[in-house]
Structure formats: C-alpha cells, structure tokens
Image (cartoon, rainbow, N blue to C red):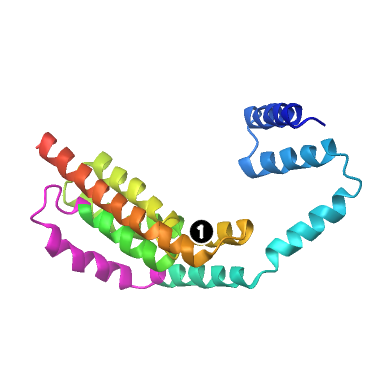
Amino acid sequence: MDPIIMTLVLTLVLFAFLSMGLWVAVTLFFVAFVGLLLNDTSNIGMIMATTTWGAASMWTLAALPMFIWMGEILFRTRLSEDLFRGLAPWLNHLPGRLLHVNILGCGIFAAVSGSSAATAATIGRMTAPELERRGYDERMALGTLAGSGTLGLLIPPSIILIVYGVSAEISIARLFIAGALPGLLLIALFMGYTMIKSVATS
C-alpha cells in the first residue's frame, strides 16, 4: 500500500479510537495492529510475540522494580518529612516562602525515586496539610505540587527514560545526561513563577 494512503488510514483509525474514549495504550495497540494488517503481513502473531519478548527480556528493565521499591520505602518512612523540615528554614525569606518546598522537594525526590507519581504522592502527603494549616492559598499550593510533581519524568533516574531508552534502543546514560539540565531549568522556572505570582498577589 502507498505510504501516504496508509498514513491517512492509520491517522483516521487513531482519532476514531481516541474519540470513542479508549485508553491511549489500547488505541496505539489497535493502530499498530491495523498497520500490520495493511502491510499484508502473513504471520502477525509471530512478529508481535518476538517483538514483545525482545523488549521485555532486556536486563535494563531490571532496574525499574528497584526504583519503585525505593520510592515506596521513602513514602513509608520519615525521611521525606525530614526533607520538608530541612528545606523550610532556607526558603522563608523568598517570596512565596514555603510554597518553594513543594518545588525543591519534588526536584530532590524525583532524583531519588525516578517516578512522577511517587514524587507527587510523597511530597503532597507531607506538604499539602502543612501548607493548608499555615493558611497558604490552596490553588497555589496544589499548583506548585502538580507542576513540580512532573519532574520525576525528566530528572534522572527517570523510570520513563529507562523504558524509552530500552524501547528505542538509545543509550540510557545519554538520556539521563540530556534530562538533567532541563530538569534544573524547570525547577528554576517554577520557583521564578511562584515568586512573581506571590509578589503580584500580596
């Protein structure tokens, strides 16, 4: 089949499944399956089996359970609370004050856990009640948490970068190096926006 026609057909299939409310992962699976059918592949089952096994049997993925376990340990212990107490005295003189604990805390925890979900859950569990008790604006508190919680996707050792590196056969070390500087830049931008917003609303 002509590549242009195939591209149009697969694009229509993609948007059709997405418009039906299917999960993105399920939609992409069906799009790939339709692409195999349009290529007149005679042994789709064998191709899918070998591709899936080849992607799942790499030793690089063995690091993922360890990162998840480490994040769970930090979530269940008092180490994360000590992080909040250690950062708070350094940030009292900045505009926004303890709102920056969300940002720096998420940045530090992202560099430990490698997971955005674990980062947002752990830091939010500590800081959200404390900021609410001290009278901080709820929208700003949750906004800084939601924004900086995504740093776990970018700052090494990111679980997503490991999965992407294995799937795309790219050096994971280079991905980690490429994610460090943008992660630090995002932390600075989040803190800058929080200071500007705090000054503007005060």
Q: Which residue is label 1 attached to?
A: 161
What is the x, y in percent for residue 46? 86, 55
Residue placed at 25% from the left, 42% from the top? 140
Nearer the observer, 47 or 71 = 47
User: Is residue 38 covered in magenta?
Assistant: no
Magenta residues: mostly which secondary structure?
Answer: helix
What is the x, y in percent for residue 80? 31, 68
What is the x, y in percent for residue 183? 35, 55
Nearer the observer, 71 or 174 = 174
Residue placed at 57% from the left, 56% from the top? 164
Residue placed at 10% from the left, 57% from the top? 92
Nearer the observer, 22 or 31 = 31
Q: Quadrant of the N terminus?
A: top right
Three-letter code, disc 1: Leu
Nearer the observer, 178 or 73 = 178
User: Is residue 90 covered in magenta?
Assistant: yes
Question: Crowding at label 1, few (<14), some or many (≥20) Cα neighbours within 10 Å?
Answer: many
Magenta stretch bounds: 74-99
Residue placed at 81% from the left, 58% from the top? 49
Q: Quadrant of the C terminus?
A: top left
Q: Which quadrant would residue 106 be assigned to in this image?
A: bottom left
In the rendered structure, the answer to whether residue 12 lies left or right of residue 41 reads left
Total marks drawn?
A: 1
In the rendered structure, the answer to whether residue 180 lies left or right of residue 17 reads left
In the rendered structure, the answer to whether residue 178 lies left or right of residue 141 reads right
